[in-house]
Image (tube, rainbow, N blue to C red):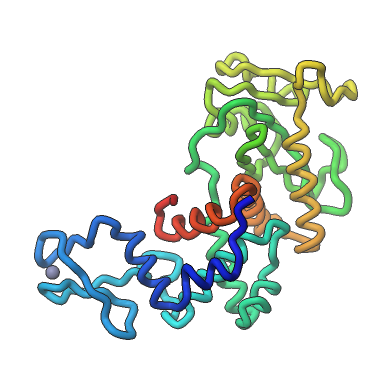
Amino acid sequence: MDKYSTRDFDRDFPNDDACLEWLFNQRWPDGVFCNKCQRTTGHYRLNNRPVYSCEFCGSHVYPMAGTIFEGTRFSHLRLWFKAIAYMAVTRCGISSRQLSRDLGVTVKTGWRMFTQIRKILSENGDGSPLTGIVEVDETYVGGHRPGKRGRGAEGKTIVMGMVERNGRVRARIIPDVKARTLLPAIDATVSKDAVVHTDDLASYRGLGKMGYAQFTVAHSEKVYVTGDGIHTNSIEGFWSQLKRSIDGTYHHVSARHLQGYVDEYSFRYSHRNDQQAMFLTMLGRVVGVVA
Ligand SMILES: [Zn+2]
């Protein structure tokens, strides 16, 4: 695993100016088109302000505007970058309180950074389709004990997950486990040439008709792995990690905040093998560019 350490961060982003310059270069890698000059022109940084100016006409551009940093004091920009780095590298999750402590900011500021950064972690819908062997499953989150399908599930939130074996995961909150809920979600997330592994829940029966190669493992008959390597152990492993993390870090996640947490956790899982790439990807999302 490529680690991304505090030392790496300090080298790449020694101060607010370096962060601003990074942001400027990410947003306008081919130069800034100046509306007044009607062409791409050189821009230089104005001293001590988060502003770049056209070298010909003096028009201003603001790299922080239109990003999650809009409205943030320039003197906090590096702190924000650091918060993103912390959230990228803490595989076991970090709470907003811990983030506040690590950054030396108030609980309120820490919470704001935490929630804003989570917004950029949502991969559902904008990633490329999952391919290869994809395991699909659902689980119940919340309450005192994990629920069983159709029993004791009151007050729990249902999360559906799809994971490439040895690869990326997508997870989302769903209202029920009916075919009309599960099948369109798979259709929107999983490539048609993927091989889909599920358990024997009846709602998954329509997958073949939709054009997927589907294999099921009969959990209802206590079968968990077949001789042909058909199983849903990867997604089950993801569920147990997710639930451990919720118990260990958050104690309780309200249904309202659960999707944000699931997004963050899925993002970390998908990028688990390379912290530096994960950090740069997260930063790239800040400006809508995936590194
Ligand atoms: Zn100009």
Camera-nearest residue between 106 and 54: 54
Indicate left or right for 34 with 245 as reference: left
| Direction bottom: furthest residue | 48
The image quadrant where one finds ligand 1 is bottom left
Q: Quadrant of residue 113?
A: bottom right
Determine the residue positioned at 81% across, 46% down.
Answer: 154
Q: Is residue 242 visible?
A: yes
Q: Nearer the viewer, residue 25 or 152?
A: 25
How far across and down, in percent of the image, does residue 276 sit? 55, 56
Q: Position of residue 37 (x, y in %)?
A: 9, 65
Q: Answer with the quarter of the image where residue 218 lies.
A: top right
Residue 7: x and y in percent read 57, 70
For residue 197, what is the image quadrant? top right
- Give the residue at x 25% y 56%: 30
Of residue 6 and residue 208, the one placed in the foreground of this image is 6
> In x, y percent, where is residue 18?
40, 73
Whether residue 182 is situated above or below residue 105 in the rendered picture: above
The correct choice, above or below, for 107 with respect to 177 in the image is below
Give the left or right position of residue 274, taking residue 67 as reference: right
Q: Is residue 218 above or below residue 173?
A: above
